[in-house]
């Protein structure tokens, strides 16, 4: 079940905890992708808090918002780049996206497999996708006062396995949101310190969200096909052998 766009907007832009979460996740995204100069950047779900750094240099930025969630104009004071779309039918040409960001999209989808197939279609060969989901082992997935407490939280192995089944190749993973999901003054004032400590101590166990960077696997095979099925059979072995003619 997708969250309502107004609830997401209010959390990220009108609460101190939401602004802290936005900053923590966006810092990790920028560490992975410092720039997107001349590229097409597409976000799905409620990705707009993470897209702003790319508005200046990217060739194009598109914020896709599913119909079940609703849409809002964004960015404020600039030409709108947000688009309302069907979850499994994006208004994006095949292979158009160089960078793809998921935030509050995968874990709330009722058909995550079809959604990943659509993401694979839209991503360019050699392009990268960044999937950001609630961490099953983190504190944020246990508090329904934030958007990370809704939908299906993931462990790292669960997320990577699902991506592999839908033709994505995980390359690296990081985590964010190491500060507790509390608006109390102490936790808010020390939030940046907790993020620094968390990134040094744990790559995925303690953070509130998991972030997996994946590339498009261009070796197409049906989901669930064993890896050995990709091995090529020599042509001469696959062809029927001629029978000896009678003397």
Image (spheres, helix red, strand yellow):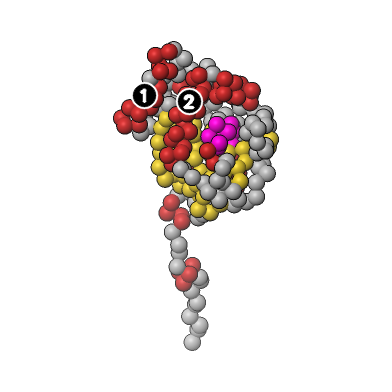
Q: Mark 1: which secondary structure?
A: helix
247 left or right, relative to 69: left
For the N terminus, give its image quadrant: top right
Residue 186, x across and y down, in percent:
39, 14
The picture quadrant where one finds residue 181 is top left
Does the magenta-highlighted stretch encompass residue 45?
yes
Q: Residues within 10 Å of mark 2 (few under 14, many from 20)?
A: many
What's the residue at 45%, 62% (across, down)?
232
**Residue 126 visible (yes or no):** yes
Per the rendering, the mark at residue 21 is: 2
**Residue 179 visible (yes or no):** no
189 left or right, relative to 216: left
Per the rendering, the mark at residue 194 is: 1
Point out the stretch of residues depicted in magenta: 44-52
Furthest toward the left, the residue is 201
Residue 88, x across and y down, in percent:
64, 39
């Amino acid at each position: 079940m997708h969250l309502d766009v107004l609830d997401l907007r209010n959390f990220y832009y009108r609460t101190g905890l939401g602004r802290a979460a936005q900053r923590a996740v966006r810092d990790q995204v920028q560490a992975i992708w410092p720039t997107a100069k001349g590229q097409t950047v597409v976000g799905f779900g409620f990705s707009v808090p993470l897209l702003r750094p790319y508005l200046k240099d990217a060739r194009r930025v598109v914020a896709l918002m599913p119909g079940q969630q609703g849409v809002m104009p964004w960015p404020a004071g600039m030409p709108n780049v947000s688009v309302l779309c069907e979850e499994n039918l994006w208004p994006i040409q095949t292979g158009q996206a160089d960078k793809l960001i998921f935030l509050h999209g995968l874990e709330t989808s009722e058909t995550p497999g079809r959604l990943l197939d659509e993401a694979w279609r839209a991503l360019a060969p050699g392009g990268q996708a960044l999937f950001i989901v609630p961490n099953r082992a983190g504190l944020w997935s246990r508090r329904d006062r934030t958007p990370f407490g809704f939908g299906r939280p993931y462990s790292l192995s669960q997320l990577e396995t699902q991506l592999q089944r839908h033709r994505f190749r995980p390359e690296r993973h990081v985590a964010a949101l190491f500060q507790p999901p509390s608006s109390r003054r102490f936790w808010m004032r020390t939030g940046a310190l907790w993020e620094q400590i968390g990134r040094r101590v744990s790559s995925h166990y303690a953070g509130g969200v998991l972030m997996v960077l994946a590339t498009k696997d261009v070796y197409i095979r049906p989901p669930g096909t064993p890896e050995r099925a990709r091995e090529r059979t020599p042509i001469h072995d696959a062809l029927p052998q001629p029978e000896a003619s009678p003397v």
